[in-house]
Image: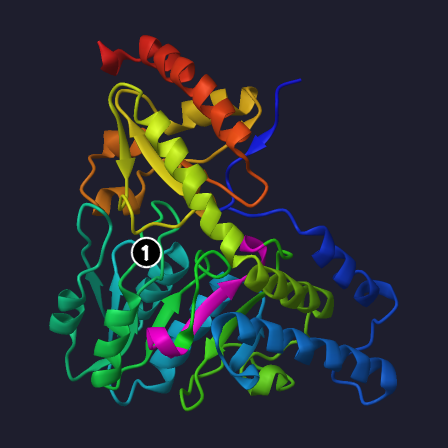
Amino acid sequence: MAKQVYMDHSATTAVDPVVTEAMLPYFSEKYGNPSSLYSIGRQSRKAIEEARQKVADLIGAKKEEIIFTGSGTESDNLAIKGIALKNRTKGDHIITSSIEHHAVLNTCKYLEKNGFKVTYLPVNKEGLVDPADVQKAITPQTILISIMHANNEIGTIQPIEEIGRIAKEKNIPFHTDAVQTIGKIPVNVDTLGISLLSISAHKIYGPKGVGALYLRKGTFIEPQMHGGGHERNIRSSTENVPGIVGFGKACELAKGRLPDEANLAKLRDSLIKSVLQIKESYLNGHPTKRLPGNANFRFSYIEGESMILSLDMKGVAASTGSACSSTSLEPSHVLIAIGLRPEESHGSLRFSLGRENTQEDVDHVVSILPDIVNKLRMMSPLAR
């Protein structure tokens, strides 16, 4: 059997055994509804509040500024729609980037259909937004700036602190999708000047189906789910207690393991150096301002999907980009935005390393990838 190597941690991560252990009692032993007044309900409420504090601690926030949701996608929707609908009498203009996750882009497109105006800022060839472009795009009608902290496909880390200063000077709420950065690089909402921030548990070795929105005190949004008034009447729905407990534990572990995440950069650089020895291979994204575990390449004359299937037969899991759009035949909007032609975009491959990956894993990948690329090029009509 082929050696199994998982290098798609930007898509999802395995639940840490410590996280699973923390969650288990809340499925069948401590199963009370956290809104109930009796002891088993209060037990669940206490667990939620403890988890809320752990999430807040990871990003330098106050406990009461954390709103639990069902996913990073829901957090993005709640932030963007929530600000837009709350402030539509003040203005109708939103600023975002052309390389956002679809959870942001499609939310903005929905708002455009409902009378809002959206500016989609360009990025340079390395995937960076220019803060000067943010400044120039602001109008008296601007009610929200939403720029992701780091891109899920190419790993480029944005100048969020500079953009945060601009937003603060103009008194405009600033949202960032930090799903890919939480637990991987230091994140502090005060240092970055963030008003709203989206997080997802399953990217940091927590369970799927739970996320959070950081909502700075004094920032007000319109709820998108109406019901019994849960989560300070911002996100009604009986809380997913086991998921929230697991999320909290994952954040607690992530905070203590941030130095380990930094060590991933060494493995990433080793992988990049070796892969770029392959003829006509190129790195997508910024060479240094990138997530510690992200390495995104493009290879001339072949398709990323063929490489993924070939790697899978050798026991290696990688991707062409976002897992949310892996079934689409359209070229990546991120790669098109950084100036690649559609055929170049289709020839791209993303490796995203995690805490269980080793130099041995990297060596295994670089030992099999050149042969895969060469064989696929021999079959490609584009290579002739």
Residue under pointer 1: 157
Q: How is the image coloured?
A: rainbow
Residue 342 coordinates in the image, percent (x, y): 24, 34
Residue at 29%, 47% (x, y): give it. Answer: 288
Horizontally, is 283 left or right of 133 in the view?
right
Horizontally, is 382 left or right of 358 in the view?
left
Residue 200 coordinates in the image, percent (x, y): 53, 61
Q: Which residues are magenta?
A: 190-204
Would you say residue 203 sits in the magenta stretch?
Answer: yes
Residue at 28%, 39% (x, y): give it. Answer: 284
**240 vs 42, nearest the viewer:** 42
Badge 1 marks a residue whose secondary structure is loop
Quadrant into which the N terminus falls: top right
Residue 11 coordinates in the image, percent (x, y): 50, 46
Query: What is the quadrant of residue 376 in the picture?
Result: top left
**83 vs 275, nearest the viewer:** 275
Residue at 42%, 63% (x, y): give it. Answer: 178
Query: What is the quadrant of residue 220 in the picture?
Result: bottom left
Using the image, determine if residue 243 lies above or below residue 153: below
**281 vs 148, nearest the viewer:** 281
Quadrant into which the C terminus falls: top left
